[in-house]
Image (spheres, grey):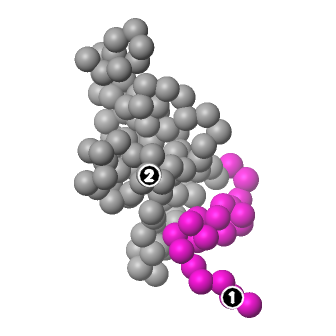
């Protein structure tokens, strides 16, 4: 029986059939384009390399083995954005986010 598709299932299906050498960023990009055609939007921030770097810089700690984060984990400021826009923000501004100054406990100053 066909299952109802969400962006997450579409991403997973594309991940499962991707050829060797195709990683998380290309998989995400393909899923967002096919998802746009199917009117499926991501609800999670998918942490490919650039977005992961931005997430870790913003949060001040490693993301670990997490591949995607839901809105319940996002900082308040990111909740103003769609998941796709938040992913784009994190990827685009990853270097600027690494310059956030923090006190010794990790809290931004």
Of mark 2 and mark 1, the one earlier in the sequence is 1
Q: Is residue 109 visible?
A: yes
- Secondary structure at badge 1 equals loop
**Outermost residue, top side:** 104
**Outermost residue, bottom side:** 1
Please tell me how crowded label 2 is: few (under 14), some (14-19), or many (20+) other residues with Cα within 10 Å: few
Q: Which residue is pictured at 46% across the width and 81% down the height?
A: 38
Q: Which quadrant would residue 99 be assigned to in this image?
A: top left
Measured as percent of width and height from the top left, residue 63 is found at 55, 35
Q: Can residue 14 be seen in this view?
A: no
Measured as percent of width and height from the top left, residue 22 is found at 64, 52
Q: Which residue is pictured at 41% across the width and 74% down the height?
A: 36
Most foreground residue, 23 or 98: 98
How many discs appear?
Answer: 2
Residue 37 colored in magenta in the image: no
Give the number of the mark in front: 2 or 1.
Answer: 2
Residue 9 colored in magenta in the image: yes
Residue 40, compared with residue 20, is above or below; it is below
Stretch of the chain drawn in magenta: 1-21
Q: Which quadrant would residue 96 be assigned to in this image?
A: top left
Q: Which image quarter is the C terminus in? A: top left
- Secondary structure at badge 2 equals helix
Picture disc at residue 72: 2
In the image: residue 106, left or right of residue 79? right
Most foreground residue, 17 or 59: 59
CA gap, disc 2 to disc 1?
Answer: 29 Å
Picture disc at residue 54: none
Residue 11, compared with residue 22, is above or below; it is below
Q: Which quadrant would residue 102 be assigned to in this image?
A: top left
Picture disc at residue 2: 1
């Amino acid at each position: 029986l066909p299952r109802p598709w969400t962006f997450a299932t579409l991403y997973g299906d594309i991940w499962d059939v991707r050829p060797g050498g195709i990683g998380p960023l290309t998989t995400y990009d393909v899923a967002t384009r096919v998802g746009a055609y199917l009117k499926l939007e991501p609800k999670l921030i998918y942490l490919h390399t650039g977005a992961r770097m931005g997430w870790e810089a913003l949060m001040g700690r490693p993301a670990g083995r997490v591949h995607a984060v839901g809105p319940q984990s996002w900082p308040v400021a990111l909740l103003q954005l769609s998941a796709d826009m938040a992913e784009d923000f994190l990827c685009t501004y990853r270097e600027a986010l690494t310059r956030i100054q923090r006190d010794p406990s990790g809290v931004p100053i």
